[in-house]
Image (cartoon, grey):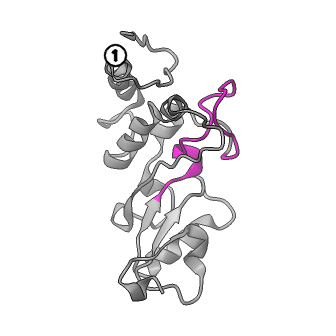
């Protein structure tokens, strides 16, 4: 029905092995960085059918996960807490075997709002992990010999603290960084 209206269907990765899947349907992979229970095979079904994938592994870039065990905001269902380092460390093209950068339409960092009550809560869950998600999505894979490293990111994102504070963004500070706020 969706394709008949001239639109491109998008479905959760579970639909990737459904019979009669419209060719070119986009799959939304929300599983884990290390797939379990056939999540990867289901997602590959979209690629085999001429579609591509949106990568949003829950244990890497779901913004509604707790930053750490003591966080008052967030959930832990996606393999525990999702620190900014964990959000940074994954590579979209390395999650599902035989799925390459060309098979990936993009990356999404979703935020479900069960624990959110205010706009400041949104900021605290999103920042700086949204930057980690963006860098994981748009940069080469992280590694000690590459241009993308955790230490480089920590330094660059730490330098944004004064700007974020001036802009009214209530971010969650990364441990081990002097987050000099100018508030």
Q: Which residues are magenta?
A: 55-78
**Where residue 151 appears, x then y in whole percent?**
39, 24
Q: Which secondary structure lies at badge 1?
A: helix
In the picture provided, is 36 more to the left or to the right than 49? right
State the residue at coordinates (68%, 44%).
Answer: 79
> In this orientation, which residue lies closer to the viewer: 50 or 183?
183
In the picture provided, is 110 more to the left or to the right than 76? left
Q: Is residue 168 magenta?
A: no
In terms of secondary structure, what is the magenta stretch mainly? loop
Where 157 sits versus 23, above or below? above
Give the residue pinned by disc 1.
Answer: 162
Quick one: which residue is furthest to the front in this view?
Answer: 118
State the residue at coordinates (50%, 33%).
Answer: 119
State the residue at coordinates (60%, 53%).
Answer: 32
State whether residue 33 appears in this view: no
Q: Is residue 57 magenta?
A: yes
In the picture provided, is 12 more to the left or to the right than 38? left
**Where residue 169 appears, x then y in whole percent?**
41, 26
């Amino acid at each position: 029905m969706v394709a008949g209206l001239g639109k491109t269907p998008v479905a959760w990765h579970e639909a990737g092995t459904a019979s009669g899947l419209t060719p070119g349907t986009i799959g939304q992979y929300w599983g884990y960085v290390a797939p379990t229970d056939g999540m990867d095979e289901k997602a590959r079904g979209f690629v085999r059918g001429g579609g591509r994938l949106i990568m949003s592994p829950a244990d890497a870039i779901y913004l509604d996960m707790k930053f750490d065990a003591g966080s008052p905001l967030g959930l832990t269902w996606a393999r525990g807490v999702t620190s900014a380092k964990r959000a940074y460390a994954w590579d979209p093209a390395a999650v599902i075997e035989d799925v390459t950068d060309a098979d990936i339409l993009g990356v999404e960092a979703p935020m479900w709002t069960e624990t959110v009550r205010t706009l400041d809560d949104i900021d605290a869950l999103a920042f700086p992990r949204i930057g980690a998600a963006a860098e994981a999505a748009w940069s080469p894979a992280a590694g000690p010999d590459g241009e993308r490293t955790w230490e480089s990111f920590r330094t660059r994102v730490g330098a944004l603290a004064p700007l974020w504070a001036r802009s009214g963004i209530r971010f969650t500070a990364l441990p081990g960084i002097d987050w000099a706020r100018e508030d």
